[in-house]
Amino acid sequence: MSIRTKRYIGAAGSHLGLSVLALICLIPFLWMLSTSLKTKQNMWLFPPQFWPVHPRWQNYIDAFSFAPFARYITNTLTLEFFIILGQVVSCTLIAYGFSRFKFRGREVLFFVMLATMLIPEQVTMIPLFLLFSKMNWVDTYLPLIVPAYFGNAFYVFLMRQYLMTIPKDLDEAAKIDGANELQILWRVLVPILRPSLTIIIVYTFTGVYNDFMGPLIYLNTPEKFTLAVGLANFVSSRGTEWNLLMSASTVVLVPLLLIYYVAQRNLIGGIASLGIKG
Amino acid sequence: MTKQVLSKSERREERMGYLFILPWIIGFLAFAAFPIAASLLLSFTKWDIYKAPSWVGLSNFQRLFQDELFYKSMKVTLTYSAFSIPLSLVLGLGLSLLLNLKIKGIDFYRTLFYLPSVITGVAISMVWMWIFNDGYGLLNYLLSLIGIEGPHWFKDPNWVLPAYVIMSLWGVGGSAIMFLGGLQNIPGHLYEAAKIDGASVFQRFYKVTLPLLTPTLFFLLLMGIIGSFQVFTIAYIMNGRGAGGPDNAGLFYMLYLYQKAFKSFDMGYASAMAWVGGLISLVLALIVYRTQNKWVYYEAGDTGKGEKA
């Protein structure tokens, strides 16, 4: 066999292997979509139908009329907006402070900040709940939003690493032109920082979108529920109507899939560039 | 040493620096330092949030070590990690080798396999619940095609944990992408040299690839241990509204902590649980950390600080 043929066979084999794995990876989504379009009777067929002959789009309308999903979407997006804003602003300022200014104790404080990433969430969860309930913040969005305005160790770290690679000459030039510290940050550095800002925005978005425990603990009134908690609540009210549950799940997952599609380079690149060096 | 005298501009720089990191300092005091101290104090009290807390000394810890469900939840969590972590490391490594091939459309596959690690949370948990349905689920149907009568999964205490492990393996693309980052950092000349020395494909894998991937392996192992003590959302949904599952076979540590704190409002007890769980995962992580000299390979010049803090 020539090397060329061998190579072709090799490539074909790899493609075959990868496609099978890709299918396994996609099956849950396809099954969700297919179930979401089935009638009640079709759903309980065994062997199951892979794709309904007459897709029932009505399921989506039903799901929306049985639970206030539009409301949950608005709530989730409101939270997203305020949390992302907080993270972006606070992490940029903090990373700027840690990377561009000399002050006593800087290295120690930076190390302490990194160490906070190791604090297990379950330890801080209970005192924070008690604190927020003393402040009468339970059943409001404040416990979920306010902490975002005080930075996040991981994002600050990410951004500070990025800032360290930007030469200080740019700052100096702007300083000579009479810009103050905030102007330098806003006019000179932020435009360059866009890639790491995108990573923070995308990570925060998916984090908030998937967060279940926070809203579960803090929100009591159904009108305030996020999509995650609303969907979990929907399960208990519509126990076995899997077709409706799957249409609701599809509605919840679509924005996440879209964001993933748009930001895939940043996400995968971001993870890979965390650079566990070999 | 003479006292350092800062010039006017240096003093201004220092002030500005503190000013910019001020949000973090406040956040650190309010959302890290205070809760840690408070949590430690709380673990020595009895508090149901309605009445004032009362000091009970070590009694929460004594109760904890006599609590069968505490041992059960620990067993569930550790058994889960004992299977899900090694399996996802091995499969993730295998997948990353495939994803490192230089073939057409490889970017598409990378994107696809990473997808499950972004999709966590309630919606996908519900999809799994339906797939694992014992009577009409897709999984048991596929098993029946090859002549296997599927188990009752979430209704059978023996099959609850295997189901959780299977679900965790669906997210193996996440670790594959991490391994891929490591693979791409391996300089090609090492392979060339090994080839010239007559090393076979397998020898090249064991002698070159694997040693150079050990830092990634180490990092993922640590993350896996910490992560299994945080399993919550999927268990809350799959077991049904935060219950423990049949015979509490799905009672993950975090889930039990949640039950104690937010269902029975036993805040002191739950704080004690948080500390014990935190310490156990810390000890496990430290054991792994201490063994790294034996198996984690860092390139010369890299001072053993390859792991990310």
Image (tube, grey):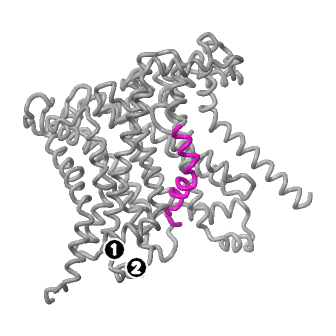
Which image quarter holds the N terminus of chain A?
Answer: bottom right
For label 1, the residue is A100
Query: Do the dots labelled 2 and 1 sit on one chain?
Result: yes
Quick one: label 2, few (<14), some, or many (20+) residues within 10 Å? few
Majority secondary structure of magenta residues: helix
Residue A50, quarter of the rendered image: top right
Q: Secondary structure at mark 2?
A: loop
Q: Residue at horizontal 37%, vertical 39%?
A: A78
Residues in magenta, as a range = A255-278
The amino acid marked with disc number 1 is Arg
Checking the image for residue A168, the label placed there is 2
Q: Residue at horizontal 31%, vertical 28%?
A: B69
Judged left or right of residue A266, residue B142 is right
Residue A55, quarter of the rendered image: top right
Q: Position of residue A97 (x, y in %)?
A: 30, 68
Residue B87 at least partly seen: no
Q: Are marks 2 and 1 in contact (CB under 8 Å)?
A: yes
Closer to the camera in the image, B94 or A201 = A201
List the single residue furthest toward the bottom: B2
Residue B157 at least partly seen: yes
In space, the residues marked 2 and 1 are separated at their CA atoms by: 8 Å
Checking the image for residue B110, the label placed there is none
- Does A46 sit above or below residue B68? above
Q: Position of residue B5 (x, y in %)?
A: 16, 86
Q: Position of residue B166 (x, y in %)?
A: 55, 34
Write down the chain letter for disc 2: A
Judged left or right of residue A209, residue A100 is left
Q: Residue at horizontal 63%, vertical 61%?
A: B206
Q: Earlier in the sequence, mark 2 or mark 1?
A: 1
Closer to the camera in the image, A211 or B43 = A211
